[in-house]
Amino acid sequence: MAEQAQPIQVQPEYKLPPEAYYDQAWLEKEELQIFGGSWLFAGLVSEVAEAGSYKSVKAGLNQLVIVRDKHGDLNAFHNICRHRGAQLVQGTGKCGALVCPYHKWTYGLDGKMRGVARREEYGDLDAEKLGLHRASVSTWMGLMFVHGHQDPTMTLSEWLAGIDVALGVFAVEKLQLLKSHSFTFDANWKLYIENHIDWLHLWYVHAESLAALKHEDGEVEQYGRHWVSYDPVKDEHRLAFENSHSLPEIPHLKQQDARYRETGAHFVFPNLPIFTGSSFFVTADLVPLNPEKTQMNINVLGIPGGDADAFLDIFNAITKDEDAVIVENIQKNMRSKYFSVGPIAHTYEKAISDFHDNYLELIQ
Ligand code: FES
Ligand SMILES: [Fe+2]
């Protein structure tokens, strides 16, 4: 691992208490300050490709709707009718205007109030002041991110702090969605993140599934709150490894540095693990359903023509049957009065300590 050569100054620490992983009040604080205060992954630009197409998304306590307007621009609004607060739309769809299902107040694709049924009932009604509350949406190589504030303190590009450039080589806008899949597991969302950026478990939890990789030679880089890693294949396994791919190679990676075709595991703070390789770019965002239950939403992006089901089977055998299972295992212990975290590995678990620092910076 590249960081191994660095002199070790400080023993990294595990900084969150057990209740951060099971307490409902703690999750509510996270919804407000972590999920409500970050740019959050909200799906693929291709989901709202045409004028009038929309997608509703949850961002912490905020319910948002992303809409493409008639000029082709993306807008994000709070999905809250200005009459009595009903949600205007659910899921994805296409419309000419956002019409509230409750009493038919109507809003343009630009969020402006456009019409009120039984207008005479409301006396002096100032349509200018009754447009939808704006939120923010921005895109990065075909991926959408939202923020609950109209004017976030950082642009998406500032928030991404260089990971956008570091992963830009994957040019996801040139890839297609091959497969989507969601599953839930019984553990706090942070335990999965901590496992995702834990280099130490690769040797043990994935002793067989990742046996072809040479974890000792892995590379890890931190970009602001975010994390990038590549795990090279052992020379003796290279041929078998390359022949085992069930998806076609991504053409635009062929001319690039070899590291981009190695097994990549990345993390966009706060809740987006990303997996990359010579034939795939996978987003796997985590949504807490309650403090001890999390949903993972997987999008497999790549080049059509391979066997996406076979790919997903292999992917799930690692991320679900090994990673989710081991964090469920920890979760079962967290309410015990005997539970505590001992010293953590100074190189291979340092990223967890960094994650806690970034997390605590937002939640305090
Ligand atoms: S709540 Fe939307 S029209 Fe009444
Ligand atoms: Fe893992």
Image (cartoon, rainbow, N blue to C red):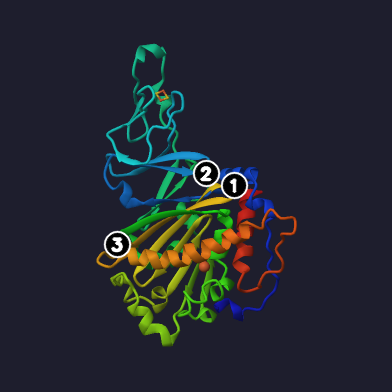
Decide which of tag 3 and tag 2 comes sooner along the chain.
Answer: 2
Q: Position of residue 145 (x, y in %)?
A: 43, 50
Decide: is 257 above or below 28: below
Check the image and name the residue furthest to the right. 337
Q: Residue at x 48, y 64 (%)?
A: 321
Q: Which residue is mark 2?
A: 60
Q: Secondary structure at mark 3?
A: helix
Q: Which residue is mark 3?
A: 174
Decide which of tag 1 and tag 3 comes sooner along the chain.
Answer: 1
Give, as a three-letter code, the residue at label 2: Gly
Q: Position of residue 26 (x, y in %)?
A: 64, 46
Separation of marks 3 and 2 at Cα, in angstroms: 30 Å
Who is closer to the viewer here, 200 or 337?
337
Disc 3: CA contacts within 10 A as few (<14), some (14-19) or many (>=20): few
- Nearer the observer, disc 1 or disc 3? 1
Q: Position of residue 316 (x, y in %)?
A: 43, 64
Circles 1, 2 touching at the beta carbon (< 8 Å) = yes
Q: Quadrant of ligand 1?
A: top left
Q: Which residue is mark 1?
A: 30
Give, as a three-letter code, the residue at label 3: Lys
- Nearer the observer, disc 3 or disc 2? 2
The answer to whether residue 83 is left or right of residue 245 is right
Separation of marks 1 and 2 at Cα, in angstroms: 8 Å
Q: Residue at x 26, y 45 (%)?
A: 50
Q: Position of residue 130 (x, y in %)?
A: 42, 26
